[in-house]
Amino acid sequence: MALPQLNTVKYDMVIPSTGQQIKYRPFVVREEKVLLTSLESGDAQQITNAMRDIVEVCTFKEVSVKSLAMFDLEYIFLKLRSKSVGENAEIGIKCSNEECGHMNPVTINLDAVELQGDPMAKATVALTDEVGVTLNYPTVQRLEDVMKGSTTENQIDLVIGMIAASIESIYDASSVYPAVDSTPQELIDFIDSLNKEQFSKLQDFFNNFPKLKEEINFTCEKCGTENNQVLEGLNDFFG
Ligand SMILES: [Zn+2]
């Protein structure tokens, strides 16, 4: 017997990096289950895949998720989640008083969390008189392609991989070399060959990647310390 269909509520949102206006719906139990399973696995790739699938179906496949920037995906996902499980999320935050370290339940309004930074920024960085690079925030797909072959055992490899994925093109006095024509390893070798000063110019761009950010103030329920902490990145808003 065919059961009744439920009406879907739709909301509007603007994609930060493109300004495109999209419609979305909250996720349903089926999708929540996939998400929880991926979170339990603790595997970053599996969590990203679950987020990607959920964002795709909940935006009625109007959005090409692979061409979004990673921070777009995080932002859309947070907004989806706030409409799906309630805009007030309770998360556990550790008291900053080292002798205490008590985990405090803190309520955050997910709807009010915004992306900090300029999501449409691009940069052209001169490395020498003749050689330089053009940087742009990498898409989910680009990041995946570039990071696939790289070792991400330590923080510096992760940063180099992210910067390699951000390179749109490299130029010298005679030509422009689009990054997509190079292998990820060639881009990483290029970054490895930079001196410290040149590298820090590229790192500046990475440091300014837009992030979900929210300042949280609360009084520790155990020791009374006034806490002033910053939540940063999607992980901090799960709890
Ligand atoms: Zn405390």
Image (cartoon, grey):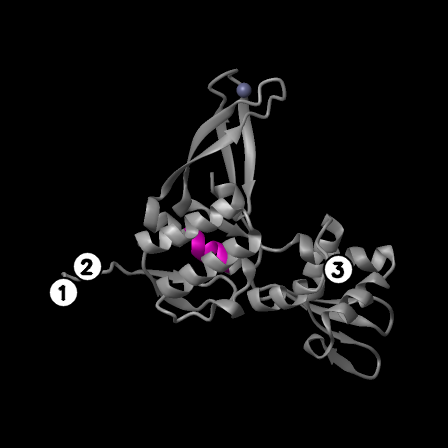
Dot 2: within a 10 Å radius of its alpha carbon, few (fewer than 14), some, or many (20 or more) residues? few
Label 3 sits on what residue type? Leu
- Mark whose residue sits in front, 2 or 3: 2
- Give yes or no for residue 75 being in the magenta stretch: yes
Q: Residue furthest front?
A: 1
Residue 137 seen anywhere in this rendered image of the structure: no
- Left or right of 131? Residue 139 is left
**Quarter of the image holding residue 124?**
bottom right
Q: Give coordinates of residue 209: x percent, y percent.
A: 62, 55
- Mark whose residue sits in front, 1 or 3: 1
For the residues bearing labels 2 and 1, Cβ distance under 8 angstroms? no
Q: Give coordinates of residue 5: x percent, y percent.
A: 17, 62
Q: Which residue is mark 3?
A: 202
Indicate the secondary structure of the residue bearing disc 1: loop
- Left or right of 130? Residue 217 is left
Q: Is residue 78 above or below residue 147?
A: above
Q: CA distance from mark 2 to mark 3?
A: 50 Å
- Give yes or no for residue 213 being in the magenta stretch: no
Q: Which residue is mark 1?
A: 2
Q: Give coordinates of residue 98: x percent, y percent.
A: 63, 22
Where are the magenta residues, as a range? 73-78
Q: Residue furthest bottom?
A: 174
Label 2 sits on what residue type? Leu
Which quadrant: the N terminus? bottom left
Residue sitting nearer the eye, 152 or 218? 152
Residue sitting nearer the eye, 31 or 118? 31
Indicate the secondary structure of the residue bearing disc 2: loop
Name the quadrant where ligand 1 sits: top right
**Quarter of the image holding residue 167?**
bottom right
Label 1 sits on what residue type? Ala
